[in-house]
Image (cartoon, rainbow, N blue to C red):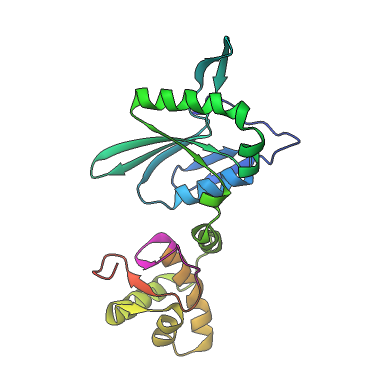
């Protein structure tokens, strides 16, 4: 569990991110941290993540000090565990407070080397990407369910099996001829994409002409 409690302040935006992967609310103290957690929630290799995970003790200018990085992430790849400690900062904060932050980051690097972990700094450049925008859009459809959800999913999957490759516009048009059925099917398709099964390159802007593929096919 987190070693440091995040409290509301005048200079930051705090809140709770409802993590599906971790099945609990993750505390954040900036919208940039919240956005980072959304990315983690949809990264297949991420097995575990936790906010405010460790307090690192170090000395600077002959004084004892502490530093708590923002997030610990565990990734699994070929039965191997990889741990990374992250600090989430806006670039403007890094530039204006670098001399104050530098000793903290050096202490974190030493700590991670001892643990055989990694330490990384993430900014809005790495976080606020086309992938984030796509996931923000797709996330709106996760909590809703169509009355004909199962039938629509089955029909879309059968069409994808036949086509192998298609765009959302093509897939919906091939599967359903009636306009109202197409309108009902589109949110279901977005849910299928965000949940897996039907794939799309989330690193490119998502629209009705984005190339789709079957996640478990040779086209993935």
The answer to which quarter of the image holds residue 12 is top right
Can see residue 142?
Answer: no
Asked if residue 148 is among those painted magenta in the image, a careful observer would answer no
Asked if residue 201 is among those painted magenta in the image, a careful observer would answer yes
The answer to which quarter of the image holds residue 128 is bottom right
Q: Is residue 219 left or right of residue 66?
A: left
Magenta residues: mostly which secondary structure?
loop
Magenta span of residues: 194-206
Can see residue 96?
Answer: yes
Residue lying farthest bottom?
Answer: 177
**Residue occupying image coordinates x 61% and y 28%:** 99
Q: Nearer the viewer, residue 87 or 195?
A: 87
- Where residue 60 appears, x then y in whole percent? 56, 15
Relative vertical location of residue 173 with respect to residue 31 in this rendering, above or below: below
**Residue occupying image coordinates x 55% and y 45%:** 123
- Where residue 84 appears, x then y in whole percent? 41, 36
Q: Nearer the viewer, residue 108 or 144?
A: 108
**Residue occupying image coordinates x 31% and y 65%:** 215
- Where residue 165 appears, x then y in whole percent? 33, 78
């Amino acid at each position: 569990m987190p070693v440091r409690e995040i409290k509301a302040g005048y200079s930051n935006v705090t809140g709770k991110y409802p993590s599906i992967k971790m099945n609990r609310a993750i505390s954040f103290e900036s919208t940039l941290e919240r956005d980072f957690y959304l990315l983690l929630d949809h990264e297949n290799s991420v097995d575990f993540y936790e906010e405010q995970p460790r307090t690192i003790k170090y000395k600077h200018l002959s004084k004892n000090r502490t530093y708590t990085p923002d997030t610990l992430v565990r990734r699994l790849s070929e039965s191997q565990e990889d741990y990374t400690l992250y600090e989430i900062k806006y670039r403007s904060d890094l530039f204006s407070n670098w001399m104050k932050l530098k000793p903290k980051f050096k202490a974190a690097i030493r700590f991670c080397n001892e643990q055989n972990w990694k330490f990384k700094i993430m900014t809005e450049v790495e976080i606020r990407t086309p992938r984030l925008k796509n996931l923000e859009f797709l996330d709106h459809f996760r909590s809703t369910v169509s009355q004909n959800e199962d039938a629509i999913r089955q029909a879309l999957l059968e069409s994808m099996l036949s086509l192998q490759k298609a765009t959302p516009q093509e897939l919906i048009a091939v599967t359903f001829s009636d306009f109202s059925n197409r309108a009902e099917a589109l949110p279901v398709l977005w849910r299928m994409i965000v949940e897996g099964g039907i794939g799309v390159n989330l690193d490119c802007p998502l629209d009705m002409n984005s190339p789709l593929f079957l996640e478990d096919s040779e086209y993935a």
